[in-house]
Image (cartoon, grey):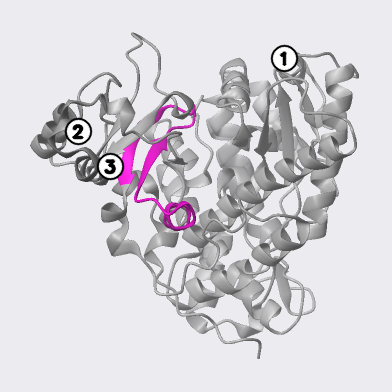
């Protein structure tokens, strides 16, 4: 057996900041008096206010904001007596405003507060706009006793070696959460967010390499995104790189493109060194087809949708799982929305996209037995693949602008176009596949074997074998369901 699994307070790993934040965000102008701020905090029963100049119509962003807290006011009174109440808020405010994304897990916020030695954070949406506030008081009930193994560690790793050490903790965290009875789909979301944080830090370290080599900083603003399972928040422990890069301006093979090509190569090398292997299909920002300016991506997407051969669309499907993880807010996310808008109603494109992904492997024999090879079954190819591909194709066709497979299935069902029972069966099957794959991966890693998607059927309990058989039976409907619901 491997190392004993850590006892983990699982709550911060499965609940997101948006679930505990205070919203909407509360703002005060910098010229307002400290006394007015104190009166408002007391009246509204809040412990902080964000300090932001009034700018009609402008979305509040962290780089323009500061924060004043109850403690700031008390310190000012201790230093200046009653005169402090007449000071402008700007005199006692702290800048810049430290923030955390609303979709981040609570453990990230706890780690960030501990690292920065602060008790308040702003909360931002996908566009980088401040939408709420988070305090240590909000997170108090989530605090773990030694279980927050990752925290902010990935984001603060000083070099590749430190990044690798932080990333190496992930399997033990997954094992601990699984032992606590946490569903694999929740653990998959945590792993996926970790992949995003890892990719973001790899980009920062890659920029440093470029600067050290005399290549300067980025020639224009850019954003990194993860694709595939990491974008859908369905990653498990057997993974490789799937990423893309969007920059604001520049032509293919132009100066900007060449700079970002080198950056992408460094990012891929760093991720591989840390333990996330190169993508065998080449879906990495170092390759020209997976990076480009906003204009280049627009043209590329239009080109995809006008194609008529599945061979021209290899790996394009996972672009529709894109999730931005760093860079200028909304830059890559905007391209993702554009792709859904342009593909809306394009049944032929959605059909070709599904075909280009390849065929699903049969998981059951003619007699309803589980098909195995050397005692194992690849539940990605025989199980998850069919559900993910179908849900993605139908989401693209019917403009269900979601990333996760379960949300796509729910959105398709909500359209009322039929197949309700089959869609519900698939929504039940996907978590079953995730549970069984992750449990096998944890067991294999503990025995010194690499994590794969191949599950040993002989190790399963009778209940799990029955669950697996039912899930594989449900997946048999995906081809017919796709044909019925695409038109």
The residue tagged with tag 3: helix, strand or loop?
helix
Where the N terminus falls, by quadrant? bottom right
Query: Is mark 2 in CB contact (under 8 Å) with mark 3?
Result: no
x, y (%) of residue 405? 53, 45
Does 95 appear above or below 191? above
Q: Which residue is mark 1?
A: 302
Front residue of 23 and 408: 23
Q: Position of residue 162 (x, y in %)?
A: 71, 62
Q: Which residue shows up at 78% across the image and 21% down it? A: 219
- Residue 72 got which mark? 3
Residue at 50 percent of width and 34 percent of height:
402
Look at the image and say whether residue 116 sits in the magenta stretch.
yes
How far apart marks 2 and 3 lie (CA) works out to: 11 Å
Q: Nearer the viewer, mark 1 or mark 2?
A: 2
Q: Is 402 located above or below residue 198 in the figure?
A: above
Q: Position of residue 217 (x, y in %)?
A: 78, 28
Q: Residue placed farthest to the bottom in the image?
A: 1
> Which of the 4 image quarters holds residue 397?
top right
Between the C-alphas of marks 3 and 1, the distance is: 53 Å
Q: Residue 214 placed where, x, y %?
A: 89, 32
Q: Earlier in the sequence, mark 1 or mark 2?
A: 2
The quarter in which the C terminus is drawn is top right
Which of the labelled discs sits on residue 37, or is there none?
A: none
The residue closer to the viewer here, 70 or 16, is 70
* Residue at the outermost top position: 56
Residue 132 magenta-highlighted: yes
| Contact (Cβ within 8 Å) of mark 3 with mark 1 | no
Query: Tag 3: Cα neighbours inside 10 Å, few (<14), some, or many (≥20)?
Result: some
Instruction: Give the magenta part as a residue range.
Output: 109-134
**Dot 2: few (<14), some (14–19), or many (≥20) neighbours within 10 Å?**
many
Mark 2 sits on what residue? 84
């Amino acid at each position: 057996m491997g190392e004993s699994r850590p006892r983990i307070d699982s709550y911060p790993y499965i609940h997101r900041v948006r679930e505990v934040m205070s919203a909407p965000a509360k703002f005060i102008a910098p010229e307002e008096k400290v006394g007015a701020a104190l009166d408002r905090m007391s009246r509204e029963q809040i412990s902080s206010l964000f300090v932001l100049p009034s700018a009609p119509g402008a979305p509040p962003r962290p780089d323009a904001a500061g924060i004043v807290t109850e403690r700031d006011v008390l310190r000012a009174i201790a230093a200046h007596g009653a005169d402090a109440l007449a000071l402008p808020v700007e005199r006692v405010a702290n800048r810049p405003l430290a923030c955390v994304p609303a979709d981040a897990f609570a453990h990230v916020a706890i780690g960030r507060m501990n690292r920065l030695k602060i008790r308040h954070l702003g909360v931002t949406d996908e566009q980088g706009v401040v939408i709420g506030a988070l305090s240590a008081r909000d997170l108090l009930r989530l605090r773990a006793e030694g279980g927050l193994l990752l925290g902010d560690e990935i984001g603060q790793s000083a070099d590749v070696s430190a990044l690798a050490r932080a990333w190496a903790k992930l399997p033990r965290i997954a094992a601990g959460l699984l032992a606590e009875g946490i569903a694999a789909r929740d653990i998959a979301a945590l792993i996926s967010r970790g992949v995003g944080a890892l990719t973001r830090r790899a980009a920062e370290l890659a920029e440093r390499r470029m600067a050290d080599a005399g290549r300067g900083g980025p020639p224009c603003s850019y954003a990194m995104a993860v694709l595939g399972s990491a974008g859908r928040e369905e990653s498990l422990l057997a993974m490789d790189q799937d990423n893309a890069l969007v920059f604001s301006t520049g032509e293919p093979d132009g100066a900007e493109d060449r700079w970002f090509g080198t950056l992408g190569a460094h990012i891929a090398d760093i991720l591989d060194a840390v333990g996330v292997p190169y993508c065998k299909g080449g879906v990495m920002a170092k390759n020209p087809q997976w990076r480009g300016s906003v204009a280049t991506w627009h043209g590329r997407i239009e080109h995809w949708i006008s194609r008529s051969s599945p061979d021209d669309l290899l790996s394009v499907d996972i672009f529709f799982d894109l999730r931005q993880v760093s860079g200028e807010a909304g830059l890559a996310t905007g391209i993702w929305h554009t792709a859904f808008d342009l593909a809306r109603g394009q049944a032929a494109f959605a059909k070709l996209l599904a075909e280009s992904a390849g065929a699903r492997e049969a998981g059951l024999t003619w007699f309803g037995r589980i098909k195995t090879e050397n005692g194992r079954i690849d539940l990605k190819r025989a199980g998850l693949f069919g559900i993910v591909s179908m849900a993605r194709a139908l989401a693209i066709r019917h403009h269900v602008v979601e990333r996760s497979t379960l949300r796509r299935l729910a959105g398709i069902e909500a359209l009322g176009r039929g197949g309700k029972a089959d869609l519900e069966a698939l929504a039940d099957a996907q978590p079953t596949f995730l549970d069984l794959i992750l449990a096998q991966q944890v067991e294999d890693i503990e025995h010194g074997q690499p994590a794969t998607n191949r599950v040993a059927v002989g190790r399963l309990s009778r209940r799990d074998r029955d669950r697996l058989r039912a899930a594989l039976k449900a997946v048999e409907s995906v081809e017919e369901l796709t044909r019925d619901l695409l038109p």
